[in-house]
Image: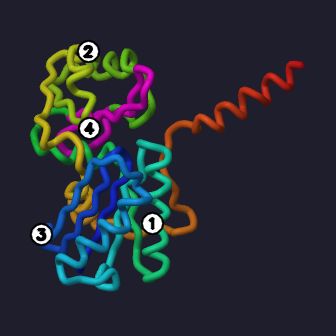
Amino acid sequence: MNILAIDTSTMISTVTIADENEIIGDFNVNQQKTHSESMVPMIETLLGLLGMEIADIDKFVIAKGPGSFTGLRIGMTIAKTLAQVYKKDLIPISTLLALANNSSSDRVKVPMIDARGNRVYGAAYDKDFNELIKEDLYTIDDFSRRVNELGRSIELIGTMNEKYEDRFGRAISLPINFNNSIGRSLIKIALEGELIGEDLYTIKPNYLRKSQAERQLIENDKKDANK
């Protein structure tokens, strides 16, 4: 069985390919191009280097968010299209859960993704990856308070560690090689959990909040209603 995982949740485009025993290809690029420009060529290049074709993939895995609105839409569209065309399963997995799975220690794992404006997409997981603090959009003050109230030794995982580490007690930040690319963890979760594909017509990105355009539309509707 061959599995191909895609992540476009952040600025990094990730494609990872594995069989049921090992990772056989991993391609991560942080660049100025958009995911729409980079992702398909990355998939084609990695498959070519491995002497494979897209028809050789048995299952697709997608990081469903939270993260970049545009990135999530692009990644989800590509993954759903490939799964539909080749009639294969698509497994959506939380970006934050995959980020937490970059660590295998016994500490509480606290992944964070930048949501701008002193806000983060965050969650907390125990050593068995059970959710201790639900994944959601938080202000950094609210999120750090919730984490500190756990009273546990924690690992901060993600690119926001340096910026916010001083907000957390009993915390260590994982080094650079653990803090972004999650393709291998997506594969790990898909294999260990024996997950099955979901309905392609109901799978959608987990944005956790409305887009700027949607928020502006709601605000405009409120203003019009008050005139």
Please tell me whether mark 2 or mark 1 is closer to you in this view.
1
Mark 1–mark 3 Cα distance, whole angstroms, equals 24 Å
x and y percentages locating residue 144 in the rendered image: 31, 19
Q: Nearer the viewer, mark 3 or mark 4?
A: 3
Residue range of the region highlighted in magenta in the rendering: 109-132
Q: Which mark is residue 125?
A: 4
The residue indicated by pointer 1 is 78
The label nearer to you, 1 versus 4, is: 1
Spatial separation of the CA atoms under disc 2 and disc 1: 38 Å
**Residue type pointed to by label 2:** Arg
Give yes or no for residue 201 being in the magenta stretch. Answer: no
Give the Cα separation between the discs numbered 3 and 4: 25 Å
Check whether the beta carbons of the residues at disc 1 and disc 3 lie within 8 A of each other: no
User: Which mark sits nearer the N-terminus, 1 or 4?
Assistant: 1
Kindly identify which residue carries mark 3. 22
First along the sequence among labels 3 and 4:
3
Q: Residue furthest front?
A: 32
CA gap, disc 1 and disc 4: 29 Å
Q: Amino acid at mark 1?
A: Ile
Local secondary structure at mark 2: helix
**Kind of residue at badge 3:** Glu
Cα distance in 3D space between marks 4 and 2: 18 Å
**For residue 110, side relative to residue 41 (left or right):** left
* Labelled pair 1, 4 in contact (Cβ < 8 Å): no
Residue 213 pos. (x, y %): 64, 37
Disc nearer the start of the sequence (2/3)? 3
